[in-house]
Amino acid sequence: MPLVAAAVCPHPPLIVPELAGAAAAELDDLRAACDAAVTGLLAAAPDVVLLVGAGPETTTFDAADFGSLRAYGLDRSVPLWKTNCAGGERLPLSLTVGAWLIGRSGTPLPRLARSVATDASPATCAELGAALAGEPDRRVALLVLGDGSACRGRQAPGYDDPRAEAYDDGVARALADADADALLGLDPVLSAQLRVAGRAPWQVLAGAVRAAGGDWRGELRHYSAPYGVAYVVASWEPA
C-alpha cells in the first residue's frame, strides 16, 4: 500500500460548531487548520482514507459503523462512510471527530478506520503502523487523530503540570519536522500522566512512515492550548 500522505488533527468535541454553540468562534482557527490538512490529504489523490485514533482497544471498524456526539450534548450520529443497517454505534470519540472532519470535505472516497489502544506500547504501535503500510493494492492517506497534554494550566482537565508545555512543544517540533523517531520516543508513562490522547496514534503514524521508507517532510499548521488541552495540526508528505 503506497502511503501517499498523512494529516494529524486533534479531536475535541467542541470543534463541531453546533456543539460549541456561542463559543464556536473560539475554535475557528483550529477548524480551518484541520480543514486545510484534510484538503492537503485529499490532494495526494489517495484511493482510500484510513482514520487512526485512540480507543479502549485496538480494533478495526466497518465502513457502515458510526459514532455519536450524544454524550457531549448533541444528538447526532456521525457515519464513517456508508450508512446501512449493518453498521453499529462503535466509533470512539477520536474516530467520530475524524469522520466528521472527512465528512465536511464532501469527498466520496472510501473511508476505513482503526483504533489503537490508549495504553499500547510504542513497539506495538510501530508494528501496527507497519502493517497498515504493508497492503500493496491501494494508495492510502492517513488521518491521525490525537490531542496533546490536558495539563496546560489550572483550568485544564488534568490541572496544571509544569512538564506539559515542554512535552507538547516536543510533539509540535516532531510533527513539523516529520520526525518519526522523536514520536516513537514518546514515553507512555509520562504521556499517561499528562493525559495525552494522541501518543499511541502518533506512534502508529511513525511506524507507518518508517515502513513506507524514503524521506518525508512535515508542515505544522496549528498549535494551541485554548482550554488547557494542546491541539496540534500537521501535514506529512513524501519529500
Image: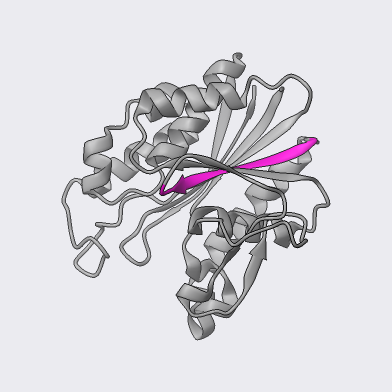
Indicate yes or no whether the magenta region holds residue 54. yes
Who's the residue at 78% across and 45% down the image?
A: 110
| Relative image position of residue 196 (x, y in whole percent) | 33, 48
- Dividing the picture into quadrants, the one containing residue 136 is top right
Q: Residue at x 79, y 58 (%)?
A: 106
| Above or below for 128 versus 55 | above
Residue 8: image x %, image y %? Answer: 54, 44
Residue 49 location, x and y as percent? Answer: 70, 41
Q: Quadrant of residue 134?
A: top right
Q: Is residue 178 visible?
A: no
Taking the view exactly as shown, the residue that stands out farthest to the right is 108
Q: In which quadrant is the N terminus drawn?
A: top right
Residue 79 to residue 116: above or below? below
Specify whether 156 is left or right of 146: left
Residue at 44 percent across and 29 percent down: it is 125
Magenta region, residue range: 47-56
* Residue 238 image-quadrant placement: top right
In the figure, is residue 167 to the left or right of 211? Answer: left
Q: Is residue 79 visible?
A: yes
- For the residue pair 31 and 69, the one nearer the viewer reads as 69
Tell me the quadrant of the picture where the C terminus can be found. Answer: top right
Please, is residue 108 above or below residue 122 in the view? below
Number of dots carrying numbers: 0
Instruction: Specify whether residue 145 is painted magenta.
Output: no
Q: Residue 149: image x %, image y %? A: 31, 51
Residue 19 vs 222, above or below: the answer is: below
- For the stretch drawn in magenta, what is the main secondary structure? strand
Q: How is the image coloured?
A: one colour
